[in-house]
Amino acid sequence: MKRLIFFICLLFLSTLGFGQIQVRYDKEAVIDSVDQAYQNAWKSVKYCDGYRIQLVAVSNKSGAQKVYNEFKAAFPEANAYLSYTEPTFRVRVGNFKNRIDAYRFLMRIQGQFPGAFITRDKISFREI
């Protein structure tokens, strides 16, 4: 019995000593300069390829503004964009990196906007 208690105490004390290990990392100076160059390169990127959902494309601004306001009232957390490319006003919503995320959101809004569809667009890199 004494041997068992002695063995358990010895096992317990040996595990306490091994828990004190410290790991130290040495980083080369060139890594900082590469990291800084990488961050600076991404700061200049404003737009990237992505997806949006187009709600409507009409020839008059008041019709597009009405759909825009209707969408913002129903989904205030989502990004919406009203754009004009002659001769059409378009209302597009969202900043989606992939088509799957755009499709999920399309399923949420399709009841209110049945003509909505997914389209490729340049999206704001900062708002993803």
Image (cartoon, grey):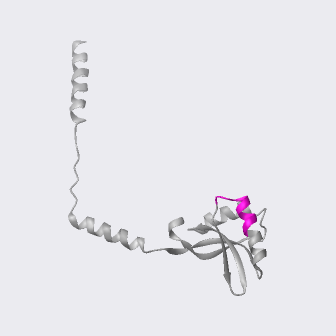
| Residue 117 visible here | yes
Of 124 and 12, the residue lying toward us = 124
In percent of the image, x 63 and y 71: which residue is there? 52
Q: Residue furthest toward the top?
A: 1
Q: Residue furthest toward the bottom?
A: 86
Q: How many marks?
A: 0
The quarter of the picture where the N terminus appears is top left
Q: What residue range appears in magenta?
A: 68-77
How would you classify the magenta stretch by its main secondary structure? helix
22 sits left or right of 39 in the view: left
Residue 68 location in percent, x, y?
A: 72, 69
90 sits left or right of 98 in the view: right
Residue 29 location in percent, x, y?
A: 21, 64
In percent of the image, x 66 and y 61: which residue is there? 104
| Residue 128 visible here | no
In percent of the image, x 22 and y 37: which residue is there? 20
Residue 103 location in percent, x, y?
A: 66, 65
Residue 35 location in percent, x, y?
A: 31, 66
